[in-house]
Image (spheres, rainbow, N blue to C red):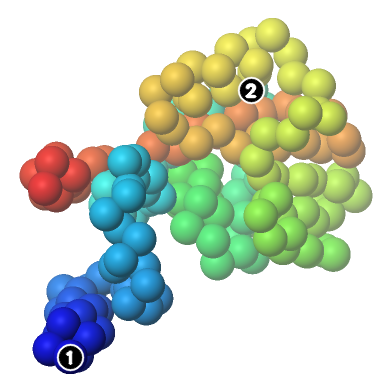
Amino acid sequence: CALGLATPTALVAGTGRGAQLGILIRGPQVLEAAQAVRSVVLDKTGTVTTGSLQVTEVAGGTAEQRLAVAAVESYSEHPIARAVTAALRGDATLPVVNDFQARPGIGAEGRVDGSRIEVGKVHDDRTLSMELNAVVTNATERGNTPVVASFDGEAVMVIELGDSIKSSSQAAISR
């Protein structure tokens, strides 16, 4: 009887303590299953890193195209869009954007001066020049995020974004 009462009580207490420490445990069954865990995968942005993205490289595109991309991204609230806007805008006045659409999980698009501009993650259906493809490959190898900007369906620019690792991450992962 004591074991039948103590086990559920301990599991509920463990779940409550996890919540106090900012760890969401979906239920006592998860704690029981945790003994079999051999690997842990973390979403790096804001967990392992500071969550403060910075543009580290911009490849391709003219000054006007970069300003148009900044304009489209200025309509989005996504952290990547905010970093891109800040890096590409400078002190310039942004052009007018029409037909803006946020595409969750993909990116954003809009029209600037009659051109349809798409800004977002790399897709297999986009053909990149060798130069832009090399930027994407290098960014990915460094653990950074490449973003492609296309004008009327043609990829013309790759923007690489990076984030800093939190000073506490190594110790937290070791624990």
Instruction: Please name the residue shown 79% across and 56% down the image.
Output: 110
Name the amino acid type tagged 2. Gly
In this figure, what is the number of numbered marks? 2
Instruction: Please name the residue shown 73% across and 27% down the image.
Output: 156
**Spot occupied by residue 106 in the image (x, y as percentages of width and height):** 70, 50
Instruction: Please name the residue shown 31% across and 41% down the image.
Output: 38
Mark linked to residue 102: none
For the residues bearing labels 1 and 2, Cβ distance under 8 angstroms: no
Give the vertical position of 161 relative to 99 (above or below): above
Q: Farthest residue in the front direction?
A: 1
Give the vertical position of 10 relative to 56 (above or below): below
Give the vertical position of 68 relative to 156 (above or below): below
Name the amino acid type tagged 1. Cys
Q: Residue 157 versus residue 39: which sits nearer the camera?
A: 39
Mark linked to residue 1: 1
Q: Is residue 21 visible?
A: yes
Q: Is residue 138 left or right of residue 75?
A: left
Q: Label 1's element?
A: loop
**Spot occupied by residue 43 in the image (x, y as percentages of width and height):** 40, 50
Marks 1/2: CA–CA distance:
71 Å
Q: Farthest residue in the top direction?
A: 130
Q: Residue 46 versus residue 70: which sits nearer the camera?
A: 46
Q: Residue 32 versus residue 115: which sits nearer the camera?
A: 32
Q: Is residue 134 left or right of residue 114?
A: left
Q: Quadrant of residue 28?
A: bottom left
- Quadrant location of the N terminus in the rendered image: bottom left
Q: Label 2's element?
A: strand
**Spot occupied by residue 146 in the image (x, y as percentages of width and height):** 55, 33
